[in-house]
């Protein structure tokens, strides 16, 4: 399923520790060249394309926030662990990917709580970031996210990969990112995976590095 609007992601101390250990490979080598940080985010995983995406991200020295649905985390727990092992941060994207603004508060609570548990059970830690499906949110959704200690994270740039954007268009979208900003991408599209090497080149050419998303500000910051 595809998301089409802005919202959050996640991390726990345990997940950060595991991810931080990996970061020694790619990030420090370029740390001195970082004039700013951007948040690369991928919604709707994990699934059949996740491992290939992770391999490409890792090979190109990129880290990202993975907004996982709870049902997928429950179905593919090994891939949640693979995300953490590859240096990614794992966040909450609801359990079944509904439009949360159309649900009563109790169901919104269930969607977020079950996802927190599924991700934790899979080894992804306890998410501190949350992105509502389709970017559809309201005061109720945000209050439930806050109840579980999560910040809602939207995006500054939409890659339009959910709308069959070409690889060129996805790379161009990344080119519009500035320091602290976040881009929306998805786990599944082939064009997104194909864009990864060029995304890395684009960011490096502008002195930008992939960062984590702060649960305090919702902005990309140094890992």
Image (spheres, grey):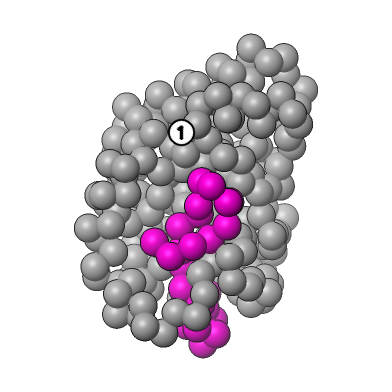
Q: Position of residue 30 (x, y in %)?
A: 35, 80
Q: How many marks?
A: 1
Q: Position of residue 78 (x, y in %)?
A: 29, 39
Other-residue count near label 1 (Cα within 10 Å), few / some / many at <14 / 14–19 / ≥20: many
Q: Residue at x 73, y 34 (%)?
A: 137
Q: Quadrant of residue 94?
A: top right
In this view, 87 is above or below 137: below
Give the extent of the magenta segment: 199-223
In this view, 52 is above or below 14: below
For the residue labelled by badge 1, is the local secondary structure a helix, a strand or a loop?
A: helix
> Residue at the bottom extreme?
205
Q: Quick check: can you spot residue 192?
A: no
Q: Nearer the viewer, residue 160 or 115?
A: 115
Q: Position of residue 141 (x, y in %)?
A: 68, 28
Q: Residue at x 64, y 12 (%)?
A: 106
Q: Nearer the viewer, residue 73 or 13?
A: 13
In this view, 22 is above or below 116: below
Q: In the shown orientation, is residue 22 left or right of residue 10?
A: left
As for residue 213 lying within the magenta part, the answer is yes
Q: Residue at x 31, y 42 (%)?
A: 13
Q: Say which quadrant the C terminus sits in.
A: bottom left
Q: Say which quadrant the N terminus sits in.
A: top right
Q: Quadrant of residue 156?
A: bottom right
Q: Position of residue 179 (x, y in %)?
A: 59, 71
In this view, 24 is above or below 16: below
As for residue 42 lying within the magenta part, the answer is no
Q: Nearer the viewer, residue 48 or 108?
A: 108
Q: Residue at x 28, y 64 (%)?
A: 23
Q: Quick check: can you spot residue 27?
A: yes
Mark 1 lies on residue: 72
């Amino acid at each position: 399923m595809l998301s089409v609007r802005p919202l959050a992601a996640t991390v726990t101390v345990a997940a950060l520790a595991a991810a931080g250990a990996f970061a020694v490979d790619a990030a420090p080598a370029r740390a001195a060249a970082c004039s700013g940080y951007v948040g690369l985010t991928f919604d709707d995983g994990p699934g059949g394309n996740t491992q290939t995406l992770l391999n490409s991200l890792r090979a190109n020295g990129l880290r990202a926030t993975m907004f996982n649905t709870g049902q997928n985390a429950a179905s593919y727990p090994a891939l949640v662990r693979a995300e953490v092992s590859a240096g990614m941060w794992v966040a909450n994207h609801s359990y079944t990917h509904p439009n949360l603004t159309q649900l009563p508060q109790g169901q919104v609570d269930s969607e977020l709580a079950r996802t927190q548990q599924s991700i934790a059970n899979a080894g992804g830690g306890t998410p501190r970031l949350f992105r509502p499906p389709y970017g559809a949110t309201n005061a109720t959704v945000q209050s439930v996210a806050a109840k579980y200690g999560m910040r809602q994270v939207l995006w500054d740039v939409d890659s339009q990969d959910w709308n069959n954007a070409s690889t060129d268009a996805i790379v161009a979208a990344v080119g519009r990112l500035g320091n602290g900003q976040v881009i929306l991408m998805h786990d599944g599209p082939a064009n997104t995976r194909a864009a990864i090497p060029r995304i890395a080149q684009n960011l490096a050419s502008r002195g930008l590095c992939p960062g984590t998303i702060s649960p305090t500000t919702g902005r990309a910051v140094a890992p």
